[in-house]
Image (cartoon, rainbow, N blue to C red):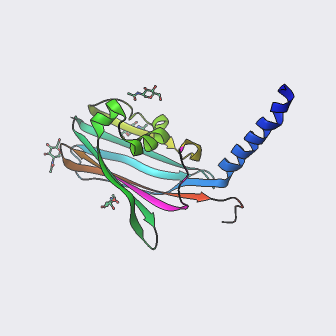
């Protein structure tokens, strides 16, 4: 009985390995901007490619006054001769979200992201905001999505005013034969 399970585990492992190996999921661009540098400053934001499949995202910024009213607008774009709006354009109450995780889309993003940053607590947000060596892992996605290049624009509002943007572009590509 026991021995019969070994080939099964082997097969599951092989399929898992193939799946992960077959998907390219990495950052391609990152644009940030503060619209009010007396409230939020970026010290740096950058991508660094460490291999064909892995690109690290680093951000360091400071919130100069406590933020207690945070709205996060997420807009998704998919590239098709220029980025076109794709599926998502919604606004989430950031402080409520950090208490309740009530938004299913943000749950996907947060789940991929949370291990790499100190942005994991309830309001207020104040002081250093750091994302370190964040890279994308397709195994953290609940569902694969159509191959292509995407941009997720995240527009951050404090007290209803737009304070900064963090726009990230990424490639999601099923790549069974690694022909690209
Ligand atoms: C982020 O994307 C939004 C939506 O397309 C755009 O209006 C904004 O200018 C972008 N910000 C930056 C810093 O590129
Ligand atoms: C920028 O942020 C500061 C600090 O919170 C605030 O006092 C000021 O009104 C903001 N400026 C604008 C143009 O919103
Ligand atoms: C972020 O930038 C600030 C200001 O330059 C610096 O003091 C701090 O050490 C930086 N933190 C990281 C993790 O790079
Ligand atoms: C922060 O992250 C840790 C580890 O992932 C988790 O256990 C904790 O519940 C998180 N805290 C909040 C406020 O989400």
User: Which corner quadrant holds the C terminus?
Assistant: bottom right
Give left or right: position of 86 versus 99: right
In the image, residue 137 above or below residue 114: below
Residue occupying the far top of the picture: 2
In the image, residue 98 sits, relative to residue 112, either above or below, namely above
Where residue 56 appears, x then y in whole percent? Answer: 53, 48
Q: Is residue 52 above or below residue 66?
A: below
Residue 89 percent location from the top left of the image: 33, 55
Give how far across and how far down residue 43 sits, in percent.
Answer: 36, 46
Q: Which residue is drawn at 28% across and 39% down?
A: 63
**Segment colored magenta:** 141-154
**Ligand 2 shows up in which quadrant of the image?**
top left
Instruction: Determine which quarter of the picture holds residue 129.
Output: top left
In the rendered view of the protein, which quadrant contains the N terminus? top right
In this picture, residue 148 sits left or right of residue 7: left
Q: Based on the picture, tell me whether residue 149 belongs to the magenta stretch.
A: yes
Q: Is residue 14 magenta?
A: no
């Amino acid at each position: 009985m026991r021995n019969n399970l070994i080939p099964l585990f082997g097969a599951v492992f092989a399929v898992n390995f193939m799946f992960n190996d077959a998907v390219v999921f990495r950052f391609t661009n990152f644009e940030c901007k503060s619209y009010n540098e007396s409230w939020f400053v970026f010290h740096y934001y950058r991508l660094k490619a460490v291999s064909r499949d892995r690109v690290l995202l680093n951000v360091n910024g400071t919130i100069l006054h406590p933020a207690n009213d945070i709205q996060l607008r997420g807009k998704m774009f998919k590239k098709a001769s220029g980025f076109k709006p794709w599926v998502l354009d919604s606004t989430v109450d950031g402080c409520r979200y950090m208490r309740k995780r009530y938004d299913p889309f943000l749950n996907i993003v947060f789940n991929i992201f949370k291990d790499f940053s100190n942005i994991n607590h309830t309001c207020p947000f104040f002081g250093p905001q750091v994302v370190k060596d964040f890279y994308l892992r397709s195994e953290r996605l609940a569902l694969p999505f159509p191959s292509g290049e995407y941009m997720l624009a995240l527009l951050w509002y404090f007290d209803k005013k737009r304070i900064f943007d963090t726009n990230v572009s990424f490639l999601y590509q099923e790549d069974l034969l690694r022909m690209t």
